Image (tube, coloured by chain):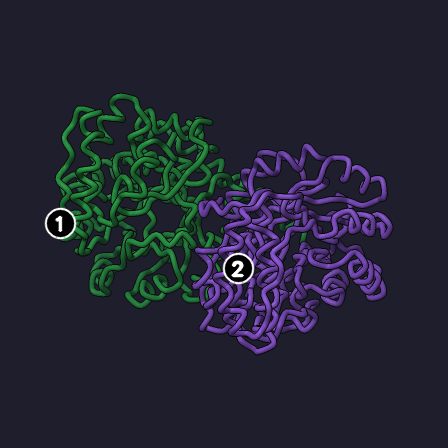
Chain colours: A purple, B green
Amino acid sequence: MRILDALDIPIVLAPMAGGAGTPRLAAAVSDAGGLGFLAAGYLTADALREQIGQLRELTDRPFGVNVFVLGDPAVDVEAVGRYRDRLGAEALRYGVELGDPVGDDDHWDAKLAVLHDERVPLVSFTFGCPAAEVLASLRAAGTESAVTVTSAAEARLAAAAGADALVVQGPEAGAHRGSFDNEHRGDDLGLLALLRQVGAASDLPLIATGGLAHGRDVAAVLAAGARAAQLGTMFLACPESDASAPHKAALTDPAFSRTAVTRAFSGRPPRGLVNRFMVEHGEAAPAAYPHVHHLTKGVRRAAAQADDPHAMSLWAGQGHAFAVAAPAADVARTLARQAREALAEAAERWAR
Amino acid sequence: MRILDALDIPIVLAPMAGGAGTPRLAAAVSDAGGLGFLAAGYLTADALREQIGQLRELTDRPFGVNVFVLGDPAVDVEAVGRYRDRLGAEALRYGVELGDPVGDDDHWDAKLAVLHDERVPLVSFTFGCPAAEVLASLRAAGTESAVTVTSAAEARLAAAAGADALVVQGPEAGAHRGSFDNEHRGDDLGLLALLRQVGAASDLPLIATGGLAHGRDVAAVLAAGARAAQLGTMFLACPESDASAPHKAALTDPAFSRTAVTRAFSGRPPRGLVNRFMVEHGEAAPAAYPHVHHLTKGVRRAAAQADDPHAMSLWAGQGHAFAVAAPAADVARTLARQAREALAEAAERWAR
């Protein structure tokens, strides 16, 4: 894959939708020799075009854009209604209205049109695999593609559709799991085991992600066969990240020592720091995405503004406690240097 | 740690209690330059002494012995009784009696006496951490010690007790999870994330285990900072393993494509291939170990003899489908060669 072959350092920024990811953050990682990423999720097509423009003013280096593949999943409208009723007290507590729990396709057609127009170097997909024609038409525009997979079966589907690379996401990852369906099996393959099975199912280049928190972890997935490592949580506390102040603070706050997977905030199962909202509502939340996302949006925003981390979605991977508030270029270069040293050390020790 | 420093290859055999692990298997791995392991679990002290003697007739190389730390956990006797009632039909089906669901300490004192007498090179512990005096007295006999840990908190306890090394077991691992308690949280750190947290909590040398299925996975944990990799499932199909024929066959049978964690067979949560018994009884099984182990013993044995994999405990890690029926020395040497190649390749690619 052209873009992965050209990286100076094997570090890919994870796309972080919902505000944390910014053009500045993506530019910093690309300029450090890695691969920056924008997250198209939740943006309008116009806002996406604007972010791409901002990024291109900041750097000439390649970058990626991640897009949600939502389709039109059937949801249990009554279950969504019951969850809405349940959250009434939260809306009162934070002085906001609950959002309208509607479905949408996250502006799929309009965003694909922008990505075509803009001829972005790499587009990655999450929550599904686009039709082969979509990937072919991107390729015709000079755009490489990657599909996020969480199982060997998904890897086979993505390879059949013509993806140029696979983002292999272990259950250790923070924020939304990119599975093609909205199940939470709770018994997923760990990242290394998943890399092994996906590698056996496909010859595509692999980008490994999920809980990586140090250059040694980057070295580990490279030794395991990945071409690059993708990290999000480790960039969440950077000054270039627009994650809210309480979110950044919670990452290394001993009061938030555990992560868990919950549908409480969005109706899909992402991983985040365990907080009050998650504990109180997680079990009751229906599998309805993005319906529940819209429902809880106002509460989450009001909680962030009130500096109350207990009703926000504190997305975080299992390595969150190692996040540092350093400039993103420093984080990327440090990860790469540590990875290089770890590989050299292990290779030398076992060279005989 | 003396023993880890002296290994020719960074491969440690996982102790496999219940029959699969044999002196021949341990000797083959030690002779290949790795570290063979005997499993003391479920043996009498005399049988353990006999196995150590057999192993020493086969090899002069160092080896380890693993011991269960059971203590005397309180169990819910009524829940055990209800589970016994539930399993009556299974006993009828396989024409056996259910075992007596009693607790025991797996002959702790007698086994420790044997290990002292025999001055075995390394003793590892599972299901808990022995008192500091136990480790000190082993050290006085020239025996190094390792404690199996599944969290940073357990790592700190083991380090405080004076362990010489830690076996860091990810949730990807087959068979029993070595946690100090009998909980199944279902939200454990993946192996790489766990290695990172344990490494931050302790400076002890780490042996990484859990779902490793290829030399690339060995390379990964070495790059992540482990001193060696421990594998069990990859040795389960070897001719030197006494795993039953249906167990060996099931590892690579597409009909057994999933693993899950269940208390159905033993009352503790180990990982095994999903079969009928697990599906039908897993939810109902109480947290009572080794009580449930004794209860189901006859059924499991009869099922194995009847070549019926659906009422046996088919322990298997997440990499089970990659197990091969090759001699153990070949498996160990192949893993080491693949690891060396993977490290050299990744180190060279990212050397600049």
Residue A84: which numbered mark, if any? 2
Q: What chain letter is assigned to the residue under label 2?
A: A
Q: Is residue A333 visible?
A: no
- How many badges with numbers are in the image? 2
Q: Which residue is mark 1?
A: B110
Amino acid under label 1? Ala
Comparing labels 1 and 2, the label whose residue is closer to the camera: 2
Asked if residue A238 is positioned above or below residue A120 in the image, the reply reads below
Quarter of the image for the N terminus of chain B: give it. Answer: bottom left
Q: Which mark is residue A104?
A: none
Give the x, y percent position of residue A198. 58, 39
10 Å neighbourhood of mark 2: few (<14), some, or many (≥20)? many
- Residue A214 picture location, percent across and down: 56, 61
Taking the image as shown, residue B75 lies to the left or right of residue B332, namely left
Q: Residue furthest bottom?
A: A306
Q: Secondary structure at mark 1?
A: helix
Q: Residue at x 60, y 38 (%)?
A: A154
Where does the C terminus of chain B fall, quadrant-wise?
Answer: bottom right
Q: Amino acid at mark 2?
A: Arg
Residue A54 shown left or right of residue A287 in the figure: right
Q: Residue at x 84, y 61 (%)?
A: A53
Task: Give the Cα separation between the discs numbered 1 and 2.
Answer: 61 Å
Task: Say which chain tag 1 marks.
Answer: B
Badge 1: how crowded within 10 Å, few (<14), some, or many (20+)? some
The residue positioned 82% from the left and 52% from the top of the image is A114
Contact between labelled residues 2 and 1, with CB atoms less than 8 Å apart: no
Front residue of A146/A312: it is: A312
Q: Quadrant of residue B262?
A: top left
Asked if one can make out residue B167 in the rendered structure from this viewpoint, the answer is yes
Furthest residue in direction top, as rendered: B306
